[in-house]
Image: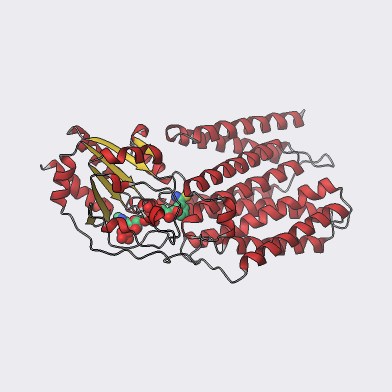
Amino acid sequence: MEISILQIAYLIASITFILGLKMLSKPQSARRGNLIAAGGMIIGIFATIFLYKRDDGQSLGNYGWIFGGIILGAIIGTMMAKRIKMTAMPQMVSFFNGMGGACAAIIGVVEFSRHAGEVLSGGEMFITIAGVFIGTVSFAGSIIAYGKLEGKIGDKNLPGQQIFNLLILAAILCLIGYMCYTGDANIMYLYTLLGLSVVYGLLFVMPIGGADMPVVISLLNSFTGMAAAFGGFMYHNQAMLTGGILVGSAGTILTILMCKAMNRSLTNVIIGSFGGSSAKGDAKTAAGSIKEISLSDAAVLCMYSQKVMIVPGYGLAVAQAQHICHELERVLENNGVEFAYAIHPVAGRMPGHMNVLLAEADVSYDKLLEMEDANAQFANTDVVLVIGANDVVNPAAHNDPSSPIFGMPILEVEQAKNIIVLKRGMAKGYAGIENELFYNPKTRMLFGDAKDTLGKLVAEIKSL
Ligand code: TAP
């Protein structure tokens, strides 16, 4: 009876995960979707704690440890989530993803240790150690990704590193093959697998950097999902299995989309022939002089345009200028100016960063143009305001084969009649390269913090 209630609880949890994920795909329903899936997770966790029976028919017990862990984790997670700045969100996602990978790996380690010295069937062995391998790689890789996004770890590509990485991967696969073949649950094999997986996770992410980080982050996400799914298999836990499969497949789809957005193959990103910082700064340096524009000239230009388009980037998120952007939109639209936002898929520091940011300021979703649509409209746009964006509008992606971002689709703002670039100085973007757009004869720079300057621009327009 209890088991069937447990299974019903898992079914409910699984349904909420699927519903929640579906709702996450639209900004209007994302918040509710997140809550629904979290509710399902709570049902799954408490059902497991109180209804699950061990092989000997006893309840789980260990309530002190379990609730101690839950309370401690909840306090740490809540504090981190409350304190985190919106711009540091990708680091937190990486960190939490790493913790998920570690948990999935620990489940495999605990199960393996329970059977230490026994001979397992090939299938049992595979499910146990696949979770250990993938979860550990995800943990180690995510911690490196976290360090890179925090700016604490640089991109390091040692000579021959890719060959070395491939050798370690081959050694891991041979070890997994051998363990499954013999079924020998020898604890030394487990330690060797753990050690090799940590080294592989660290080394595989280490050389990747620059504009390729979005791909790596979503790939690591899918690894954690897969590792959790193996845990679900092991415990016949349908909620964990469904959750893991959803995270694994969502991460894989996102990885494919990110690769498409960067116009790169996954192999190319991982083998890193031109993704890391080894390529940073290798591009041509832009030449020429820049022109500035005054606030009053920028205000007049915007006010008397038929169509204005904003290209938001990471700097907009840093400055938290989304609300004032929306205000600019209202002011210009009240004066009959057509207004839209051009969204690049990797603008900012996490997938959907600009959509989340602008949704927070209640910008209507139908004002957000995807890259292809925006590119088709730039030629008949009077003013493009590039706000805190750099790499995603860098023409080097089209013109300079030596550039680390060569081949990446960009927002082709140079087709617009006037370009105003709003940033604090001449600093480079995430990929660490010059941007010749700033030297384009049609471009004028409006220097300053995005929120501050947009506030002044709105005031100036209102005074016209
Ligand atoms: P970036 O190329 O990073 O450029 C941001 C620009 O914003 C900088 O040049 C900076 O110049 C300016 N800025 C910073 N703070 C500002 C402020 N307070 N006010 C005004 N401007 C400010 O941004 P992007 O064009 O959005 O490109 C994103 C990059 O990040 C891509 O290379 C992408 O591959 C990478 N990336 C993306 C993700 C995801 S999933 N989206 C994840 C990791 C990495 P100043 O300092 O001169 O102001």
Give the residue displayed 64% in from the left and 30% down from the top: 12
Of the pair 454 and 287, the residue shown nearer to us: 287
Q: Is residue 425 above or below residue 97?
A: below
Query: Where residue 176 appears, x then y in whole percent?
Result: 78, 56
Residue drawn at 67 percent across, 40 percent down: 240
State the residue in front, 221 or 31: 221
Dividing the picture into quadrants, the one containing residue 246 is top right
Which image quarter: residue 434? bottom left
Quadrant location, ligand no. 1: bottom left
- Residue 28 in the image: state x and y as whole percent: 42, 32
Tell me which colouring the rendered structure shows: secondary structure
For residue 173, above or below residue 368: below
- Furthest toward the bottom, the residue is 159
- The quadrant of the rendering that contains the N terminus is top right
Q: Position of residue 161 (x, y in %)?
A: 62, 68
Using the rendered view, name the quadrant where residue 102 is placed: bottom right
Expressed as whole percent of the image width and height from the top left, the position of residue 419 reads 25, 49
Q: Is residue 26 toward the left or the right of residue 324 in the image?
A: right
Residue 344, visible in the rendered structure: yes
User: Is 279 rendered above or below residue 104?
Assistant: below
